[in-house]
């Protein structure tokens, strides 16, 4: 029984394998398995568990369920993502790429909470006290009554926290730097990260302080990723965005005390992260009208409507298999849409390299974006700009039908607020469907099939296709629909 002293643990998802393999069967990631020693269980054995337990009280479903109290962070966008503030005695995981701004936003929030009179502890395992002080000075927060420490030994941290009477919030930056000497594995392995997190969460629940754990997203599989902790915490927030962009998006992917998929939008400035209260205006700020290949999507992120620009560029492929470059959207979905445009509208897109970009660094998961992506593609293919005052939303089905999406009114209202004058949206169902309330100054165009979207561009498209066919005889016919998801 005691033969297997090591096992292989996926550092991305925590799946365990007896033998090494290149790809994790659990999450599909490559090269994420690393060898770990099998931990011998400590604590009560099966015999102790068999007796001596106390009887558990069972109660009915009715009873008091007051909404949880909240600690407001005073950063409106962070509070929005958390569902109104941090819940005492809860555990929040903040994940994201290194350098994205996790330490910055948490220091900002911690300083404000401390200034509001709640005891707040910031334990840095990554940076020395001086570095954190330097950042605080840069952010103009050095006078906040924050309790700061640099520590990585879980034993010391737990001992210190056990003596804390008043602590309202404890921040651990990052969980991957902590280690417990009782474990043989190195800091940052799945075993260490899980054990340390479990111990801190247990302490947070028993002592009543809110716990925030920072977890770096790692690509190489050398450190355990935040995903191995997602099931242990009450809320998981991911910081997204491109370090080259100044926008940062904080997204709730799990929240026991609020809505998931809620986003907070920030801008990284010289003086830290600044909240962006009107993201639509920001995402559209650099849009230039009258450029082919651009369409505005009226989306919903969490509970908030957000307008973003979808950009498409088609370029004749240099040969070989055409490139598909997608930023901020699903490449499989792009392949599907192109196939629908080719099969249902007779367009020929397949021989082109296709670049698709969601401007501003937002990542969109809603199928409602199909129509805007299709509009951008058709516009690029026909070299004809979309109406600059038009927003698009609707899901596209495989037969080319346009499907209803949720919250049409909220989308239209946001478009109206930002001065848009027209919207292309799914046709109301004959029965049961409710018309979105008519909005002043916003002209709706309801369509039932993708061909209705293409029609206004069609004359130009045909001429172009004709030219392409004349230039390359047989090329359009030989071109197969791009079906496989491309990177
Ligand atoms: P940081 O919070 O250290 O990232 P993480 O903890 O997620 O690894 O953010 C580091 C980046 O943010 C760094 O590239 C510098 C930049 N930054 C600013 O642009 N302005 C600021 O005021 C601060 C504090 C950092
Ligand atoms: Mg950091």
Image (cartoon, helix red, strand yellow):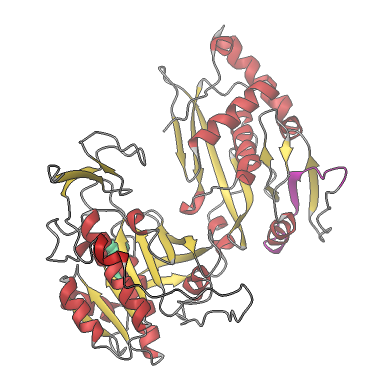
Task: Work out whether residue 423 or residue 371 is closer to the camera in this orientation and state it.
Answer: 371
User: How far across and down, in percent of the image, does residue 424 sit?
Assistant: 74, 45
The segment highlighted magenta reads 416-431
User: How far across and down, in percent of the image, does residue 161 sit?
Assistant: 25, 82
The answer to whether 173 is drawn above or below residue 71 in the figure is above
Asked whether residue 385 is in view, the answer is no
User: How far across and down, in percent of the image, does residue 162 sit?
Assistant: 24, 84
Task: Work out whether residue 239 or residue 208 is closer to the camera in this orientation and state it.
Answer: 208
Quadrant into which the C terminus falls: top left
The answer to whether 444 is drawn above or below residue 267 in the figure is above
- Residue 420 counted in the magenta span: yes
Task: Work out whether residue 43 or residue 294 is closer to the camera in this orientation and state it.
Answer: 43
Quadrant into which the N terminus falls: top left
**Left or right position of 463 against 244:** right
User: How far across and down, in percent of the image, does residue 301 sit?
Assistant: 58, 58
Query: Based on the displayed image, in which of its 4 quarters is residue 59 positioned?
Result: bottom right
> What residue appears at the point 28 percent right and 47 percent down from the top-left corner?
219
Residue at the far top: name it: 473
> What residue appears at the point 62 percent right and 80 percent down from the top-left corner?
63
Query: Based on the displayed image, in which of its 4 quarters is residue 396 positioned?
Result: top right
> What residue appears at the point 88 percent right and 45 percent down from the top-left corner?
431
The answer to whether 252 is drawn above or below residue 350 in the figure is below
Task: Work out whether residue 485 or residue 185 is closer to the camera in this orientation and state it.
Answer: 185
Asked whether residue 379 is in view, the answer is yes
- Residue 322 counted in the magenta span: no
């Amino acid at each position: 029984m005691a033969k297997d002293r090591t096992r292989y643990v996926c550092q991305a998802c925590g799946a365990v394998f007896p033998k090494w393999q290149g790809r994790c069967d659990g999450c599909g990631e490559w090269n994420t398995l690393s060898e770990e020693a099998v931990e011998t269980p400590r604590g009560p054995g099966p015999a102790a568990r068999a007796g001596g337990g106390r009887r558990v009280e069972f109660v009915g479903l009715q009873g008091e369920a007051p909404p949880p109290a909240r600690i407001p962070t005073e950063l409106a966008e962070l509070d929005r993502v958390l569902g109104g503030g941090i819940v005492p005695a809860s555990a929040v995981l903040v994940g994201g790429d290194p350098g994205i701004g996790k330490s910055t936003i948490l220091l900002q929030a911690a300083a404000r909470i401390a200034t509001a009179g709640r005891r707040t502890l910031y334990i840095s395992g990554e940076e020395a006290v001086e570095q954190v002080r330097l950042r605080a000075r840069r952010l103009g927060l050095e006078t906040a009554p924050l309790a700061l420490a640099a520590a990585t030994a879980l034993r010391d941290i737990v001992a210190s926290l056990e003596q804390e009477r008043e602590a309202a919030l404890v921040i651990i930056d990052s969980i991957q730097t902590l280690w417990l000497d009782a474990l043989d594995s190195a800091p940052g392995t799945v075993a260490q990260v899980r054990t340390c997190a479990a111990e801190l969460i247990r302490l947070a629940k028993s002592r009543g302080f809110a716990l925030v754990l920072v977890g770096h997203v790692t690509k190489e599989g050398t450190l355990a990723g935040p995903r191995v902790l997602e099931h242990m915490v009450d809320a998981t927030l991911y910081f997204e965005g491109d370090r080259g962009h100044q926008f940062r998006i904080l997204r709730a992917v799990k929240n026991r005390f609020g809505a998931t998929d809620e986003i907070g939008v920030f801008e990284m400035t010289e003086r830290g992260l600044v909240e962006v209260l009107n993201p639509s205006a920001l995402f559209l700020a650099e849009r230039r009208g009258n450029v082919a290949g651009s369409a505005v999507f009226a989306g919903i992120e969490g509970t908030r409507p957000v307008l973003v620009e979808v950009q498409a560029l088609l370029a004749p492929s240099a040969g070989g298999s055409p490139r598909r470059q997608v930023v901020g959207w699903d490449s499989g979905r792009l392949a599907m849409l192109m196939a629908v445009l080719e099969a249902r509208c007779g367009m020929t897109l397949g021989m082109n390299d296709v670049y698709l970009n969601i401007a501003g660094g937002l990542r969109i998961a809603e199928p409602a974006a199909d129509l805007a992506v299709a509009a951008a593609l058709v516009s690029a293919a026909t070299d004809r700009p979309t109406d600059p005052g038009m927003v698009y939303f609707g899901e596209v089905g495989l037969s080319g039908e346009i499907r209803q999406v949720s919250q049409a009114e909220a989308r239209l209202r946001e478009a109206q607020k930002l001065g848009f004058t027209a919207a292309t949206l799914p046709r109301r169902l004959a029965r049961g469907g409710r018309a979105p309330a008519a909005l002043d100054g916003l002209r709706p165009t309801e369509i039932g099939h993708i061909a209705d979207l293409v029609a206004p561009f069609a004359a130009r498209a045909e001429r172009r296709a004709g030219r392409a066919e004349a230039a390359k005889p047989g090329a359009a016919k030989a071109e197969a629909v791009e079906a496989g998801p491309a990177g």
